[in-house]
Image (cartoon, rainbow, N blue to C red):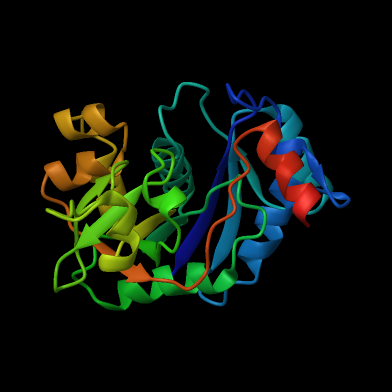
Amino acid sequence: MRILGIIPARYASSRFPGKPLVEIDGKTMIRRVYEQSQKAKSLTDVIVATDDVKIEQEIIGFGGKVMITSTKHRSGTDRCREVIDNLEASGEHYDAVVNIQGDEPFIESQQIDLITECFQDRQTEIATLAKKIQKSSELFSPNVNKVIWNIRGEAIYFSRNPIPFMQNIAKDEWINKGVYYKHIGIYGYRTETLKKITRLEPGRLEIAESLEQLRWIENGFKIVVRETPFDSISIDTPEDLSEFLNNA
């Protein structure tokens, strides 16, 4: 099976402009993501999809693969679609794609391999990861997305609120009485599924929660969820970077 790892990387982030090019212990963030992704045993290749020539030059500078994509994409998923379309136009084909977040410089390669394992099942359309929540601060933070899934391991719903709601139990006891999972924002898509979901318009659930994956569920696509012991460390703002460096 040919699987492509794609790392979408925008320069003009509203909260942290130029984020992919910030240095962490002597290497840019995007280089760290790229090198960690290359450690995954299951990826045929890795490519950065960017809209900025400065990021392109950085990738070329350390010997990586990069493709310039449109500045008009609404999401990393749309950017992945453009990469696939361009590669197929040149005669290069992949069975599946893993969308790797460009702001997680210490992503574990095992997470990528866990995603790709899901595609050994021919029924898998989309795959993602989740980690058990251990802290109430995460459980009740709207910046930490939660997920629940059915007995077949398929996502039922994603939310910024704690799910499920625990009736007749004080909220400060939810973390002890229930089991909650944080969504780890890495996705795998079968290539034909990627083409389909990027043609969909945002639905009421996505608009309500501002979570793209709800569009796919609302349109009947199945998202396989696998549990990982590894957390994700996202650098979304300059404050996140300072906090990480101070705690390193």
- Look at the picture and state if 86 lies above or below 148: above
The quadrant of the image that shows the N terminus is bottom left
Left or right placement of residue 106 versus residue 79 in this view? right
How many badges with numbers are in the image? 0
Pinpoint residue 179: horizontal percent, then vertical percent. 28, 66
Pinpoint residue 63: horizontal percent, then vertical percent. 79, 54
Left or right placement of residue 52 versus residue 26 in this view? left
Of residues 9 and 181, the one nearer the viewer is 181
* Identity of the residue drawn at 38% across and 38% down: 142
Residue 188 visible, this angle: no
In the figure, residue 126 lies in which quadrant? Answer: bottom left
Pinpoint residue 236: horizontal percent, then vertical percent. 59, 37
Pinpoint residue 167: horizontal percent, then vertical percent. 12, 53
* Identity of the residue drawn at 37% across and 45% down: 140
Of residues 40 and 245, the one nearer the viewer is 245
* Identity of the residue drawn at 66% across and 40% down: 240
- Look at the picture and state if 175 lies above or below 53: below
